[in-house]
Amino acid sequence: MITLYDLPTLSGDPSSSPFAVRIRFALRIKNLPFTTRFVEYNEIAAAAKEIGAPPTGVRQDGSPKYTVPMIYDSETKTAVADSLLIAKYLDRTYPDSGPTLVPDDTEILQNFFASDTSFTFLTPLYPLLRVGVFRKISPSMQKQYVNIGPPFDPHEKFDEKEMAEKWAQVEATLRKMDGVMGSRDTLGKAKEPTFADTALGANLLLIRYVVGADSPEWKALMLWHNGRWGKYLDWLENYGINPVKMS
Amino acid sequence: MITLYDLPTLSGDPSSSPFAVRIRFALRIKNLPFTTRFVEYNEIAAAAKEIGAPPTGVRQDGSPKYTVPMIYDSETKTAVADSLLIAKYLDRTYPDSGPTLVPDDTEILQNFFASDTSFTFLTPLYPLLRVGVFRKISPSMQKQYVNIGPPFDPHEKFDEKEMAEKWAQVEATLRKMDGVMGSRDTLGKAKEPTFADTALGANLLLIRYVVGADSPEWKALMLWHNGRWGKYLDWLENYGINPVKMS
């Protein structure tokens, strides 16, 4: 059985990390059962050392940086951290369990897409997303979250007119993505989702997580581009022989 | 024989269009001989109609927009415009002539890379690039060039300290790209260049075109990241059985 290490929420949402959501999608696409273990920021390093997951980077002070998602696979007694490396591990270890998430000739392009292009439509929303995530995590996580990434004001009120312009920018960027994807379901082969799809799907879900599925903003987004993004998320969440609900 | 339609320069450089440079690379990678026909901006539409190349977009006033690169292949009596569509045409028409530039499962990711990620490191240099291209084209092209894209001052002088900061940003972005590419030569399979490589190579050459191969800026860039980018361009320019000089 695979254990996914993820960041908890106070809101009933399954995750507050879009990087861990990639692996929720990936495990479902691969038809692999899993359990989740939630760890707050200050518990990640200890959990990583416990299972033997390596750091994924280095902090400014030179100390090792541990991050979620991490997985521990009790079948192979293997720990893996970093969403791309986890996807590659699942391909290698369970080659017949579902589509190949990272075909060899696409690895570098997928890595660029996942770390760059898949975020472009979120850029105008960054302050809103920061505040939105802040409000959905525990007080102990909040204390650390304010120190992650660029500074932000957790009590910021957003000007309605300004936000309408930001949403128009999001729409314009997603319209371009819609154009590039054309009639295909996926960023990869005609009918099989890839690691890049899990990144795009997770970043779309980050918006839903912050504004809520019932908000006018999310409902509007679901109507853009002939309903493409709703259909895209449905397809991703229900892909495979044993589709499982995201939560 | 294939004719490539390209934008002329006054400087002896082979092209002033990074999009046409992609196809210069692509034709060499495919080992296909070609001749170049240079057309100024105001000659592109007539040339396109002459060979039957379709528009690649629509202007704000609703009229069709014609762009270079375009190719005319006299063997097949076919005209193609748009760099990605030309690469796909070459794959389809000359499948055994060199590596596949756009393998099926990579088309969307390559399109994103070519239209988005491959430009990211150029962003801090945009005003410099605009002025640099302006200085290398004919007075008649200059008159139209000032109206293409965002406004710029063709007589702008660049502050030395400010430019040093911009180049540091370019270095930081290329350092990340170097990290993603790792020890691989290419953005695709281990040893074969792809369409995405032609885009990245063309954007690197745009810097060389503007600042000059003998400039301290270009010489510095050639030393970054263990000389990766110089080696990368050499590899791209000399790929194939019949490497041909870019000019």
Image (tube, coloured by chain):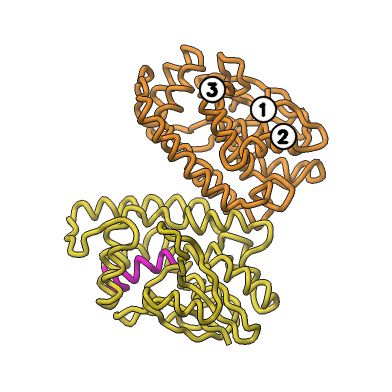
Chain colours: A orange, B yellow
Which image quadrant for residue A18? top right
Q: Give the chain of mark 2.
A: A
Task: Answer whether labels 1 and 3 touch (C-beta < 8 Å).
Answer: no
Task: Answer whether labels 3 and 2 touch (C-beta < 8 Å).
Answer: no
Q: Give the chain of mark 3.
A: A
Residue under the image location 54 percent in, 34 percent down: A55
Which image quadrant for residue A87? top right
Residue under the image location 57 percent in, 51 percent down: A179
- Which type of secondary structure does the marked residue at label 1 adopt? strand
What x and y, as percent, mark residue A215? 53, 22
Q: What stretch is highlighted in magenta?
A: B202-215
Which residue corresponds to mark 1? A4
Judge whether residue A104 is colored magenta: no
Task: Answer whether labels 2 and 1 touch (C-beta < 8 Å).
Answer: yes
First in residue order: circle 1 vs circle 3? 1
**What number is the disc on residue A27?**
2
**Amino acid, disc 3:** Ser
In the picture, which quadrant includes the C terminus of chain B?
Answer: bottom left
What x and y, as percent, mark residue A62? 41, 35
**Amino acid, disc 2:** Leu
The local crowd at label 2, few if under 14, some if 14 to 19, many if 20 or more residues have their Cα within 10 Å, is many
Q: Label 2 to label 1, Cα distance in Å?
A: 9 Å
Which residue corresponds to mark 3? A215
Residue B216 left/right relative to B19? left
